[in-house]
């Protein structure tokens, strides 16, 4: 009997794909055992396959939006499909786009493993270059590529027939520029044929951007996308098998939200117990008696579609992590340097000046140097939304505002690194002159011999003084503007009033847009290893020299104790003298 769909190329491609899945042709690494096994679709992957086949059978383009719980294998299945299409279709371009370079590498490794079990290394009909595979057999000429979206426009050179966007919400939800990139990628696909495949998948990341709108319109049937929502309750691994009780055995008793999970989604006691343990372990700030979910839990483990895209509450920068983002950037030669100031003079508000290095040529990312005061790092953790207003609270915002001013005024993309900071509570007691003097000295300016050290107009740059591409200060009122003018006369220049974020179609306001721009950096790469602790101490010297982080003051007790350890219990005095005797250089190690 003839195949009734023999004239539908996408149906035939899907049929061949299903046969290859059944045969176990695609090899993957099992997430639990770490063994190499065949890709056998789980329930979430089968939901996606059914939607894809339904669209193809209807003669429509494959267009799927997949908001999902974490670790359900959607990216893995999509990669097998992308690779399959490039392998079996002639003159075909399959493109996978990830949010960060490290994610691109990880995704390509999935395809590379599948490929290695099908082709020998010396097979001349295929070629591998970085994150691309080209099928070069006579008359074939197809290609699979994996690319990083952030930092560069992609998919603009030739038609893309199959596009898989991984973590689409992270990529474009908080930047108009990146929303344009996503639209450019989609528009790079042929528009007047059903022989295309588009899969957008992501965990949640708030209500902004194209991805939530695509999902909601797919849910309502207003668009050509099929919605495939993957709930955490569908994951058989997310259960607490040690919990032997029933629903009435929970202490504290079940909330109305938990009852709704049972009534609407048939959640088992073991699933509810897993949820509670996960929240208690990873969200200690959350009261388990409270209705609903912590925001990040709902983003990563949604039970309902709206939980993927709920309004942000809790931390303003939920993806900031002290351990992950405290990094040492060894060499910032050639980077653009900026200073940013937030004027806090009295009460709980601190005066903050940040020194920032920026490399626009790197993918978006963010790090804070280990010599930056602890108070600055803590503010990125403690900066939270006011549940009454939905806006960031005016508390613990000084350091965050100073960074936001720099990023939005100079429209920084790429990698941003806070390498030095001044944090002064009670700055009114120190006075503008005293604060300005601290900034000058930390910028390697000094008062020439014989001059009045209090006359800041006489300060001059030392040989190692830094040159700044820009400087910005909080200048929302007359007093702040006057201070900014005064700082310029005191050689803290250039220093201008903070500007507005880049114009965007879906602006949520100056602060919200600025927060969104900084969030993209924080969600990006860190790229650099943590500060190495070498018992010989020789690495510490070079790190401090290269980042100009040596403090021109006596060591604290903690620093003194640390220096004794790395110097073999030697007596510690002047920090510069001590560190100059620590041994060989970094390069010679």
Image: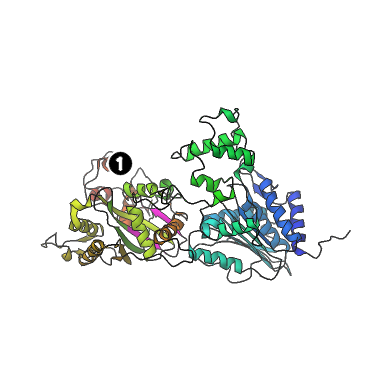
Q: Is residue 282 visible?
A: yes
Side of 62 relative to 256 (left or right)? right
Q: Is residue 242 visible?
A: no
Side of 424 relative to 30 (left or right)? left
Q: Most extreme residue toward the left, as rendered?
A: 450
Q: Residue at x 35, y 59 (%)?
A: 356
Looking at the image, which is closer to me, 279 or 363?
279
32 is higher (above) or lower (below) than 353: above
Picture quadrant where residue 455 is located: bottom left
Rendered location of residue 247, percent (x, y): 59, 31
**Range covered by the magenta-colored residues:** 355-371
Per the image, the residue denoted by label 1 is 562
Side of 212 relative to 114 (left or right)? left
Q: Residue at x 31, y 60 (%)?
A: 340
Within-10-Å neighbours for mark 1: few <14, some 14–19, many 20+? some
Q: Residue at x 50, y 62 (%)?
A: 150
Rendered location of residue 584, percent (x, y): 33, 51
Rendered location of residue 116, percent (x, y): 66, 54
327 is higher (above) or lower (below) than 489: above
| Mark 1: secondary structure | helix
Side of 553 relative to 203 (left or right)? left
Rendered location of residue 228, percent (x, y): 65, 52
User: The N terminus appears in which quarter of the rendering?
Assistant: bottom right
Residue 10 colored in magenta in the image: no
Looking at the image, which is closer to me, 567 or 516?
516
């Amino acid at each position: 009997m003839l195949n009734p769909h023999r004239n539908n190329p996408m149906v035939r491609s899907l049929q061949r794909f299903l046969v290859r899945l059944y045969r176990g042709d695609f090899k993957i690494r099992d997430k639990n055992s770490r063994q190499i096994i065949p890709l056998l679709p789980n329930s979430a992957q089968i939901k996606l396959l059914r939607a894809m086949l339904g669209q193809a059978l209807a003669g429509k383009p494959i267009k799927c939006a997949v908001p999902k719980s974490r670790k359900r294998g959607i990216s893995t299945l999509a990669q097998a499909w992308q690779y399959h299409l490039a392998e079996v279709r002639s003159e075909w371009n399959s493109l996978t786009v990830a949010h960060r370079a490290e994610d691109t590498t990880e995704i390509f490794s999935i395809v590379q493993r599948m490929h290695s079990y099908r082709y020998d290394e010396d097979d001349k009909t295929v070629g591998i270059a970085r994150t691309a595979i080209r099928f070069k057999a006579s008359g074939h000429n197809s290609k699979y590529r994996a690319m990083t979206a952030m930092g560069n426009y992609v998919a603009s050179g030739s038609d893309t027939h199959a596009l898989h966007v991984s973590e689409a919400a992270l990529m474009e939800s908080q930047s108009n520029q990146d929303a344009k990139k996503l639209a450019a990628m989609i528009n790079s696909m042929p528009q007047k044929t059903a022989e295309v495949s588009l899969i957008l998948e992501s965990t949640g990341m708030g209500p902004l951007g194209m991805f939530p709108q695509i999902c909601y319109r797919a849910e309502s049937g207003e668009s050509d996308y099929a919605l495939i929502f993957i709930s955490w309750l569908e994951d058989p691994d997310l259960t607490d098998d040690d919990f032997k009780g029933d629903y009435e055995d929970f202490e504290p008793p079940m909330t109305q939200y938990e009852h709704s999970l049972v009534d609407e989604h048939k959640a088992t006691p073991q699933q509810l117990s897993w949820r509670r343990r996960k929240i208690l372990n990873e969200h200690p700030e959350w009261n388990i008696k409270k209705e609903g979910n912590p925001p990040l839990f709902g983003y990563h483990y949604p039970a309902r579609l709206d939980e993927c895209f709920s309004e942000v509450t809790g931390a303003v920068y939920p993806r900031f992590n002290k351990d992950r983002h405290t990094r040492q950037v060894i060499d910032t030669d050639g980077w653009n340097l900026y200073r940013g100031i937030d004027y806090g003079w009295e009460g709980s508000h601190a005066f903050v000046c940040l020194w920032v290095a920026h490399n626009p040529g790197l993918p978006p990312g963010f790090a804070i140097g280990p010599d930056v005061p602890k108070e600055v790092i803590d503010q990125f953790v403690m900066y939270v939304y006011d549940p009454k207003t939905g806006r960031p609270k005016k508390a613990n915002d000084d350091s965050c505002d100073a960074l936001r001013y720099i990023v939005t005024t100079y429209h920084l993309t790429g990698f941003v690194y806070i390498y030095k900071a001044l944090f002064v509570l009670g700055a009114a007691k120190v006075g503008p002159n005293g604060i300005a003097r601290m900034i000058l000295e930390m910028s390697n300016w000094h008062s020439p011999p014989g001059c009045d050290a209090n006359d800041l107009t006489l300060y001059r740059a030392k040989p190692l003084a830094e040159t700044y591409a820009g400087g910005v200060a909080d200048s929302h009122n007359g007093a702040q503007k006057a201070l900014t003018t005064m700082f310029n006369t005191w050689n803290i220049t250039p220093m201008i009033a903070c500007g507005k974020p880049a114009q965007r179609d879906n602006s949520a306001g100056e602060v919200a847009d600025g927060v969104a721009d900084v969030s993209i950096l924080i969600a990006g790469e860190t790229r650099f290893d943590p500060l190495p602790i070498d018992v010989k101490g020789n690495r510490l010297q070079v790190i401090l020299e290269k980042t100009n982080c040596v403090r021109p003051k006596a060591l604290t007790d903690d620093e003194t104790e640390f220096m004794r350890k790395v110097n073999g219990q030697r007596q510690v005095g002047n920090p510069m003298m001590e560190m100059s005797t620590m041994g060989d250089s970094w390069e010679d190690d």
